[in-house]
Image: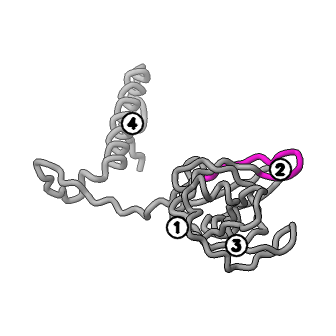
Amino acid sequence: MDRHNQFLEPERGGGLVGWAIKQLAMWLVGGFVVYTLVNNHQLFQAAEPRPAIAAPRPVHQAAATVTNTLSLHARPDGHVLVKAFVNGVETPFIVDTGATLVSLTQADAQRIGVAGGLSYTIAMSTANGTGKAAPVMLQKVRIGELEIDDVNGVVMQAPGGVSLLGQSFLKRLQSYEMRDGLLTLTWQ
């Protein structure tokens, strides 16, 4: 049995070009239909009714934690000097990671307004030996954008020297690091 399929074979008698064009057209149309169906599969899904005005959708995000840093350069002798504002008054400090408390000179304590009625009851060990200090509470200590409230400090009884920014301030930060002559303070 010789079956003759006219679709797959060209017509006899020179109609080869016409047959090729018909084949190409049918394959292009068929490919386009398949492509459209595959890429638009949502046409076959049940359509959800849409409101006339879209209601806002709540966005659930974790609260972002903002981290701030401040970098301070050490002097050639290795000390980091900083001008801080204590209770709104500009005060020079040396950052001293070995000092337990923020320690103020008597002159700085007077300018800041915490020198009145002090009781020098705390024995302190310093680089210059032992000394007496009076406890004080500093309402605000600010360096640039960094501001910390209610910082414990002391006023040193011995005259002279320089005020020290110690651990009662530094431990309130997220971190601090000294590397290659650069002190980086990090807080939230």
Nearer the N terminus, badge 2 or badge 3? Answer: 3
Asked whether, in this view, residue 17 is left or right of residue 90, the answer is: left
Q: Residue at x 42, y 27 (%)?
A: 20
The answer to which quarter of the image holds residue 60 is bottom left
Given the image, on which type of amino acid does mark 3 rest? Ala
Look at mark 4 in the image and give the residue it sits on.
27
Q: Residues within 10 Å of mark 3 (few under 14, many from 20)?
A: many
**Which callout, 1 or 3, points at the residue further toward the start of the chain?**
3
The CA span between labels 1 and 2 is: 29 Å
Q: Is residue 72 magenta?
A: yes
Q: Is disc 2 placed on a helix, strand or loop?
A: loop
The amino acid at mark 4 is Trp
Tell me the kind of residue under disc 2.
Gly
Q: Tell me where the magenta segment starts and ends, as one range.
A: 68-80
Q: Amino acid at mark 1?
A: Asp
Split into 4 quadrants, where in the image is the C terminus? bottom right
Q: Which mark is residue 181?
A: 2
